[in-house]
Image: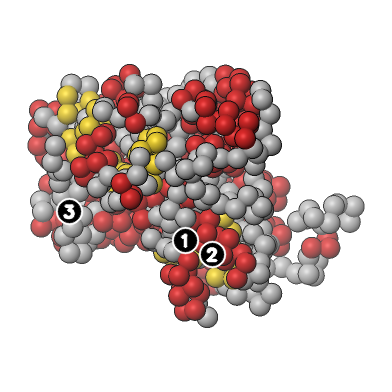
Amino acid sequence: MDPIKVLTANVDKPNSKSIETYLAGGGYESARKALGMKWEDLIQLVKDSELRGRGGAGFPTGMKWSFVPRNAPNPTYLLCNADEAEPGTFKDRVIIEKDPHLLLEGMIISGYAIGSNPMAYIYIRGEFHYGATVLVKAIEEAREKGFLGKNIFGSGFDFDITVHRGAGAYICGEETGLIESVEGHRGQPRVKPPFPAVVGVFGGPTVVNNVETLSCVPLIVKHGAEWFKSFGEPKNTGPKLYCVSGRVKKPGVYEFPMGMNLKELIYDHCGGIIGDRKLKAVIPGGASAPMLLPEEIDLKMNFDAVMKAGSMLGSAGVIVLDETVCIVDAVWRLSKFFAHESCGQCTPCREGTNWMESILNRIERGEGRQQDADLLYDITDNIGGKSLCALGDAACGPVASSVKKFRDEFQYHIDHKSCLPETKRYRSLNQPVGAH
Amino acid sequence: MADLHPDNPYAKERFADPDRKVEFPPEVKQRFEEVLTRYPNKEAALLPTLHLVQETWGWISPEAVHYVSGLLDLSPATVFGVVSFYDMYRQKPMGKYNLRVCTNLSCMVTNAYDIYEHLCEKLQVAPGEETKDGMFSVIEVECLGSCGTAPVVQVNDDYHESMSVEKMDDLLGKLK
């Protein structure tokens, strides 16, 4: 399969982030067309396209929009989730930094479809300082041209966008954590129900959509639902950005129709493994996704196929690990991340993530006990499905899958008090580890 | 407040001068007023206001917490609760150049720990602390969303991608 240039059509153009470049490519025509349509038809169009959320969960976008009540007592809000913090994921940053107007146009159309109040927010992670300045500039440009503000295209629709910077918390990528953070609180997720579509930010119905999802919307309006469905297969449609990182020769963001073969992606497009070494494991959808073994990667990268293979497409952040990587060390690093990012609100996640990190660390240091692999598996069973939000389940993904698939390597650490001889030490064990 | 633990940022000992007040300079105050217009209530302006505090003074001091709580009609405890929740808000002064080294998995397997360990040793600084001359601080951070160009080091607001120990040394030489 060859790479495509649909979502990334503009990113290689000179000065791609300016409104002039975007307009020269037919920019904001979709918004003009959409604002002349009935909102019901617009939601139906997105439903027909079978667009599914690109943030990780893969929920049908049109259906999400249709849950918003039209006569709620409080105003309706559109929030763009640009809190891209899942390890292995760096696709939204490309759109934000290189083609911000595509996102803004998507937000105008989506805001109109859900009956948004005149102010929407882009929640961008605090570390993306450059991305935030690009977006602020783009919003100013769009406002000058009358694409944002009052009575856009004479339709009577008022809409404006504010860039709201986060401050370094992965949990704010969870939609209710994001809502709390926009309201000025600690980003601790809420209990659902009520779902955000009914009661979200500032008490109003709220739609939270990922950057890539919103960026698909202008393309659907421009080319139609059938065109969008021509990429991929039924229920798994559209262009998709895949991020590949780790031990490959050519890491980066690649665009393909949904359902790209994972093996082909790694070996044909990313040049294979550094030093042509042996592949050991692949994480297909960001840190939360269970690991796949080399024999499991002849796989279509879409929501349903990856789920059937026992993992998840998530944010399509592919992390490739070769034989030099110690699996215990790799999983320790991911567990350290989840322990650090657990918001501390519910007990299974707050306690469980820290215990997993400690146990993995002691195995890696050669202090593992015979029962540790079973203990880790038992902890994942006590977190999974019992935490308040999906972070607890996410933390279990790499741990449970690696204990199951690399049991021998865990046992080797415990028996020999060292890593497998072919692995490399990527950190010194006597370095103080930052507290979390 | 005297009976609080000395590590507690509200302990009186931590205030250089207990009666000292801080205030935004006029141009920052104006930006703050603009921020307020973007939200339906004052509380929602807390995160952007704290970013303004950090831009102005480099960290979020106990005095600044009290100042922000007054500006937004929130209790100091609420403001401090938010400051302490988010990693990027600094609760103590940091070096002029804050070196944030990502060591998450994609960066780790492209030798990010070599850079991190090299920096701690070369600058003789403990993680999260500043050097004696106040020029640098080094901290290990979680995924910066730049895994395709790993390893990545964020120096204050700027990303430096596809780094190595040699490139880091070159960069340190330029940061004066």
From this view, report whether residue A129 is shown above or below residue A264.
Answer: below
**Direction from residue A60 to residue A355 in the image, left or right:** right
**Same-chain check, marks 3 and 2:** no
- Please name whichever residue, A309 or A424, is drawn nearer the observer in this view of the structure: A424
Quadrant hosting residue B10: bottom right
* Residue B126 image point, x, y percent: 67, 62
Give the camera-side residue of B92 and B134: B134
Which chain does the numbered disc 3 sit on? A
Q: Can residue B52 be seen in this view?
A: no
Residue that numbered label 3 is attached to: A10
Is disc 2 surrounded by few (<14), some (14 to 19) or many (20+) residues within 10 Å?
many
Q: Which amino acid does label 3 sit on?
A: Asn
Image coordinates of residue A261 in percent, x first then y, are 22, 32
Mark 3–mark 2 CB contact (< 8 Å): no
Residue B16 showing in the rendered view: yes
Which residue position is annotated with label 2? B99
**Quadrant in which the N terminus of chain A is drawn:** top left
Question: Which label was assigned to residue B153?
Answer: 1
Quick check: B94 above or below B109? below
